[in-house]
Image (cartoon, rainbow, N blue to C red):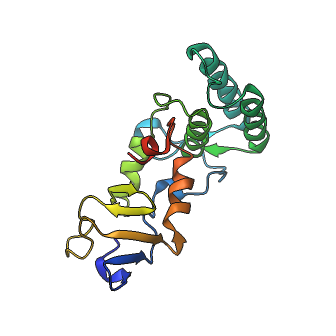
Amino acid sequence: MIGATDIDYDAGMQIRLALAMLATFAATNPTAASTAPPAPPESGLPSIVAPEVARSDLKLLYETLQQAHFDLYAHRSKAEYDKLYRTLSDSIRGPMTSVAVATMFQKFVAYGKIGHARIEAPVVEFVTYLQGGGTLLPLFIRVDGNKVLLTEPADDGGKLRAGTEIIAIDGKPVHDVIAHLGSYVSAERPYMAHA
């Protein structure tokens, strides 16, 4: 677990998080393939999805989005969505973990910027990750203009108090990290993605 001693401080309560905000599950290689047999769903281990199944499910997901939404193309054109669909479909070159497939599908769903569109997160796998020694640094933030501020304490030692400004995470500017993570959040406006 990341502790307050792992973080560099500026004089004005500004901090640089020197280690990753989350050394989590979402940080696993999304294209990792394995020849291991699929794990039973109840085990919490990511199962392996054959490439043809992943492509077929992606096609079904896109068809379902088109049928279910009054205007799927309100924020992205059909041509843009079709291009992303082809890019993702072409990127499936081998077996993928169920987590990698879920991550890809969430990014595809979020691309449309429709606030209520989402898929279920792989919660069982995430809990298994944590139980296996995985780490998590819960950060609750508010984006206030150009500042990213903690809204809740983020450590037991009291150094990462509410109101602390986050400048960078793992050496990356915090706004770059937020933009990257925001690509997985289906939101019509940036403030909705930050919520």
Residue furthest front in the image? 145
Measuring from the top left, give residue 92's x and y in whole percent.
74, 42
The x, y position of residue 91, in whole percent, is 76, 44
Q: Would you say 157 lies left or right of 122 here?
A: left
Which one is nearer the viewer's eye here, 174 or 87? 174
Give the quadrant of residue 153: bottom left
**In the displayed structure, does residue 12 sit left or right of residue 84?**
left
Question: Residue sitting at 67 percent across and 34 percent down?
Answer: 54
* Above or below: residue 48 compared with residue 23: above
The percent coordinates of residue 57 (x first, y second) are 65, 27
Q: Nearer the viewer, residue 171 or 124?
A: 171
The residue that appears at 46% across and 69% down in the rendered structure is 20
Residue 136 in sight: no
Q: Percent x, y for residue 93? A: 77, 44
Q: Quadrant of residue 51?
A: top right
Res 13 visible = yes
Q: Quadrant of residue 79?
A: top right
Report the label total.
Answer: 0
Q: Is residue 96 left or right of residue 17?
A: right
> Quick one: 105 or 94, which is closer to the camera?
105
Q: Residue at x 64, y 18 (%)?
A: 66
Quadrant in the picture for the C terminus: top left
Which residue extends farthest bottom? 11
Q: Which residue is located at x 59 percent, y 41 percent?
A: 107
Q: Quadrant of the N terminus?
A: bottom left
Which residue occupies the foreground of this view, 42 or 19? 19
